[in-house]
Image (tube, coloured by chain):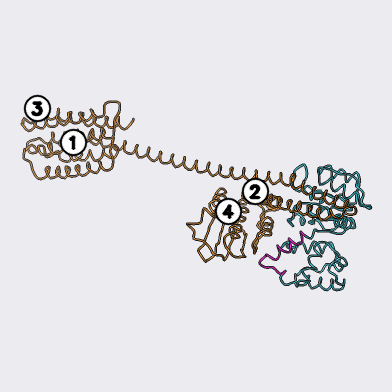
Amino acid sequence: MNQTDQLRVLIVFDGVITALASLFALAAHVWVIRSPYMVVLAILVGASSVVMFAGLRPLSGDYVTADDVAAALWWLAIANWSISLAVTAIATFAWPLLMLSALLPSAVGPSFVSPARQRVFVIISTCVAATNVLLGLLQDASGLSGDAPAWVRRLVLILFAPMLLGVFALVAVYNSDRVNAALEDAQRAQDEVAGHARELELSRGRVVAAADRERQRIERNLHDGAQQRLIALAMRLSRVREHVAASSPHLVSELDSLRAEVRATHDEVRQLAHGVYPPVLSEHGLVEAVRSVADRSPIEVRLDLEHVGRFDTAIESAVYFCCVEALQNAAKHSQVGLVHLRLYRADDQICFTVADDGIGFSLPDAQPALGLVGLHDRLGAIGGELNVSSAPGRGTTITGRVGVTTSSASDA
Amino acid sequence: MLVREGLVSILSGVEHIQLCTSCSSMPELLEAVDQHLPDIVLTDIRMPPDHSDEGIRAARQLRVTRPTVGVVVLSQFVEPAYALALLEDGAQGRGYLLKDRVDEVGRLVRAIDTVAAGGSFIDDEIVDALVRSRSRMVDSSITQLSQRELEVLSEMATGATNSVIAETLFVSEHAVEKHSNAIFSKLGLSEDQEVNRRVKAVLMFLAGRSQ
């Protein structure tokens, strides 16, 4: 049952009760208490019932807006408040019953209108209820309370109290349904977000792994292809050199020079391949790979390496390339000749620190330029985190940590 | 394959070295050893089937099945970890050379001869890398060594005997022994002077690994 239908039910329910009350008053006038006030009462209550049913108008039609719902509620509210004051004024003994009428609009509100509108209903309902109490206790202008026999008074309460409470009960049910539905929606949305987040993390991991595999492929290609050819080339040059050493000594120096060129080229290609992906990382682990990159660093590196053991490729790659990037940054930007690199295990985490005493930098400005975002991403993709602390003139420290469970550690 | 051809050609000019056969995968290698019973196996690290560390694995296997066969590994990898992996089950009859200067025939032949005689031969570039690496470590006891001692240490790490070291550094063998004692004492290594165990001890020390 949707919101509009629920409101229609409430309106009809309330309207029917009100109509019954009107008939009751009429019947009471005819058979029990002949009094003009009874007639007035019957007419007023009957009119209110009509006003309530008028609230169904805005809810008809194909497209019901929030304003339509509010309009229907206003009809309902005005009808109830009028009854509350009018009936209490005339039949004061019924004032407890009419409290329910006065407060009904504020109870119905939360399910159907915005908090701002709801506040208005609450304020008016409270005022009407208060007035209702005063009218009930402080006056008896019509004298009906005195005239009406006790059994009539009791009958009124016994008949109409449960009906009005029934409306309240229905409202309570609708409200709780709505709350539950909202909670379920919220939970579902939360689960969906969590699901997306997980999928995103997995996808990130896959992207990084694919990139690493590609790098390994390139390295292997270079090693088996270009590098081997260059070595063979150097060897051939050596042999030629041997052959011509006796007969054409003037060519020897040229051949030596050529051979030196080839060796230099081979070295360059080897460095390139190593930079793309160092085989020593996948074959011997982080410690050896870090030692190797420290050896190739243009600035001095102080090493403090614990034997952290072996881990999943994803973790070793991420930590390794972060260290490399950090070292390169220090070499390029710190303007000092020394950087400290520490690699260690701390409980179920593997941690690294790259620190220099260089010129430092101001954090918010520099991040994109230093590829720090890339480092964050690399570590983030495997659930790790990166910390950068630096200040102009105070050096730079880059710390990274990655959680490793015992199942992801495979000691070689 | 190109390098293999080049090597075949280079070594064909050497009198006391005769080629038995050449292979292109680890299974082929082991089979060839069984068939030809060579004195030396000259091998790369990477080869089919996995292109990872076949050469080193083959050496380990041969240590058990054919302990008299020497293995000289020729590799492009300058990382000491590979050489140390090769020496894990002992340094005798094992050598590790970089392909960079494999065309220096004299050096190649020296390596082959040393390993065939049961000694060890480690490329000095590897040793240099190790020494640099050791010097970088924060708790480096290597800084206690004098320049001369460092030189002797590096020579020891290549697998050289005392007499070879003496020749290379132009000192007396007695001086080498003295330096060697001082080195082992300063670095806290056991004084086992057997050459093959010594080279392994020194390399392990340089690599920062405990024995």
For mark 3, give the secondary structure. helix
Q: Callout 2: residue from which chain?
A: A
Rendered image: mark on residue A363: none
Measured in 3D between alpha carbons, the distance from the residue under mark 2 to the one under mark 4, in whole angstroms, is 13 Å
Q: Is residue A275 visible?
A: yes
Q: Name the tint of chain B in the rendering.
A: cyan
Q: Which residue is mark 1?
A: A80
Disc 1 residue type (three-letter): Asn
Q: Quadrant of residue B195?
A: bottom right
Q: Are marks 4 and 3 in contact (CB under 8 Å)?
A: no
Mark 4, Cα crowd under 10 Å, few <14 / some 14-19 / many 20+, is: many
Residue A179 placement (x, y as % from top left): 35, 40
Measured in 3D between alpha carbons, the distance from the residue under mark 2 to the one under mark 3, in whole angstroms, is 95 Å
Rendered image: mark on residue A313: 2
Residue A248 placement (x, y as % from top left): 88, 53
Could you say which chain is coloured orange in the image? A
Residue at the location (14% across, 30% down)?
A47
Disc 4 vs disc 3: which is toward the camera? 4
Q: Quadrant of residue A161?
A: top left
Residue A227 placement (x, y as % from top left): 74, 48
Mark 1 or mark 3, earlier in chain: 3
Disc 4 residue type (three-letter): Val
Q: Which residue is mark 3?
A: A31
Disc 1 vs disc 3: which is toward the camera? 1
Above or below, comparing residue A172 to residue A371 in the picture: above
For mark 1, give the secondary structure. helix
Measured in 3D between alpha carbons, the distance from the residue under mark 2 to the one under mark 1, in whole angstroms, is 73 Å
Disc 3 residue type (three-letter): Trp
Rendered image: mark on residue A402: 4
